[in-house]
Image (tube, rainbow, N blue to C red):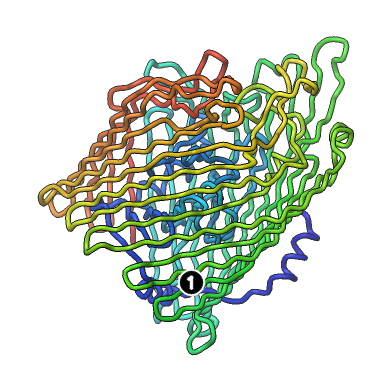
Amino acid sequence: MNICSSKALLSLLIPTIALTHAAAQSFSKNADTFFSKTLAPVSVYAVKGKTPQKTYQLKSADWVQHDASQVLLQIAGFNAIRKSGNFGFDPVFRGFKWEQINLITDGAMGAHQACPNRMDPPSSQIMINQIKEIELYKGPHNFRYGPSTGAIINFKMSDPVFSEKPIWNGRVGGGYETNGSIRRTEAYFNRSSKRWQTALAFSYSAGDDYKDGKDSIMPAVFNRTAINFTTAYLVKPGAVASINITRNFTRNTSFPTLMMDLLSDDTWMIQAKFQVAAKNKWYSQWNTQVYTSLVDHQMGNGLRPSSATMLSHVFANTETTGGRTELVFRKTNTVLYVGADLKYEYANGTRSRKMMTGMMAGKVFYDTLWQQGSILRTSAFAHLEKKLGQFQLTTSGRVDLVHSKPNQPAAKTIANNVLLAANDFNTSFSAGISRNFGKHFQLAFWLGHGVRSASITEKFINYLPVGLDAYEVVGNAQLKPEANTQFDLLLRYQTVKSLFQVNFYSARISQFITTVVDPNLKPVIATAPGVRKYINVADAAMLGFELNYAQQIGAFLNQEMSFAYVHGQNKELHEPLPEINPFELKYKLAARLMNSKLQPYMNLRYSFAQNRISTSFNEKATGDFTVIDLGLKVMTTKNLQLTAAVNNLFNISYREHLSRFITPILPLNATGRNWVLMISYQF
């Protein structure tokens, strides 16, 4: 951990104020917000008139998951890059990925992956059983929570709740999957009193190799433990101080598509907040929070055949430290958010290579991973929502001053770059307007321009194969900021028993950050086919849509359907962008019988073939497939729920398009038929 950076942060950000549970309820009632339910009990979709936003409320089956991406995959437009059978799924939304997606907890806290190959993406550090709901802000249209080019995903925890008398409540749950022998457990315990609220959460998941639809064994061993402690203190009516601590442990996890397996990944995530809801003051609310996350990561190839010639091992660690303060001003038909935030990221790591054969047997070489790269971002933002008759106007903007540098540059970096440090001044802005036409129809438009600076990996990665193919990749300290200018159109029609919503979008990305093969650079490992270097591409484009339909059929049945399509194009190289989600259809039919005590359901997912592939990245096409799941939820008592399901009912053998290959001809196929049993008890 960089101690100086943490002390500087704490001196700059003095805890002030946010929002209590009661104030949050009051504010949501007063805000100009348009809500509707999908009529299924598992999710709430919200179009708040301010940004193309969806709110997904978690259910018991989500809390037992060990990876937040498993929950995100239920939302139209999401897919995931899979390098392991059961762990570390890296979310992709509308073709945007990695740092194009801003993934945070409670509006601020996040973790930087300590693996250059993203074995531990930020989504893997989210402890899902402490999350109440997920906010998805699509596109570059809301800048309260940081730079946004592709999307902001905000995992929201519950607000503190206090009671006159001490109250205990909680939840325990577990699950088992036959294909891969996956065991899951989770527990949540909470105590509320007049002044204190304290909660403890725990989860443990482990699994073995699974079989695909053709009975081929896919390496998928994983072992994950997470613990969370949260406490809140009511300083005075309307003012709350709280601290949230999460500890994650991952051990001995298979990543068959990479050159190494994960040996250990240990994470601390700590966040402190001071919250208030003001009355009769010049402001309505004041939010401030500070946070830090530390990730220690080890991986190696000791169990691979390649270790017979070269034994490789990586030690890496990252730090993310930051804070955020925000004032809220609310008047009749107007809400204004003004604030500032600070974020410091640091990444360090070393790869050792011990030669096992030949004349160099016994010699050990050491390679720096990120050259001890660091990025400091200082920002200010404003966000306005105003109701004008039948219209609601929203504007959002932020400015970012970003300083980056390698604190221990490699010799090749010094030789090839005149300037190693960089300073970016980024401005982002968005405007949107929505209108209701009667009681049933809503129309909305947004135009946004979001800018992000290059990440530590994009600037400072040092000859490591971190991309889609086997080429080593080298960073570029002088990358220009990437900017997405995007238009969104939202149409929505709702009646008492049905909902239809479609979101069209068109994005033009200037200074798009990607890699190209540089024939002038030689790889560190002789077996690598060459070296890719990060560059800016002048023009790239994404366009597509998401369509959602929900309907209640009679007294007991309801159905949901969604379509998601994205088309990505590199305008400069005249070829498709790599790793673009295929066109996808999802359908769910569910029933609520015996006063909702029995809830059978059927899920169908059809993924169209993806033939628009990037030849320069050696991407492979993917065929279409259909997967059907059947399940039954049983509410045996008011507080006890059992779920039995069979996933991939017809034992289809298929590969997700964004799944990597174990060898050039051996894909990492998805799980075959899988029997699932889950139990959840709330008290």
Q: In this orientation, does residue 294 appear? A: yes
Q: Amino acid at mark 1?
A: Gln
600 to 168, vertically: above or below: above
Residue found 43% across the figure and 38% down from its top:
183
Residue found 58% across the figure and 28% down from its top:
255
609 to 507, vertically: above or below: above
How far from the left and from the top, in percent, is residue 172?
39, 53
Q: Which residue is mark 1?
A: 197
Quarter location, residue 133: bottom left
**Quarter of the image that includes the C terminus:** bottom left
Quarter location, residue 413: top right
How far from the left and from the top, in percent, is residue 644?
27, 39
Residue found 38% across the figure and 49% down from its top:
173
Residue found 25% across the figure and 62% down from its top:
437
How far from the left and from the top, in percent, is residue 666?
51, 15
Q: Is residue 33 left or right of residue 2?
A: left
Give the SS element for disc 1.
strand
How far from the left and from the top, in percent, is residue 148?
56, 52
Q: In this view, which residue lies farthest toward the top?
A: 358
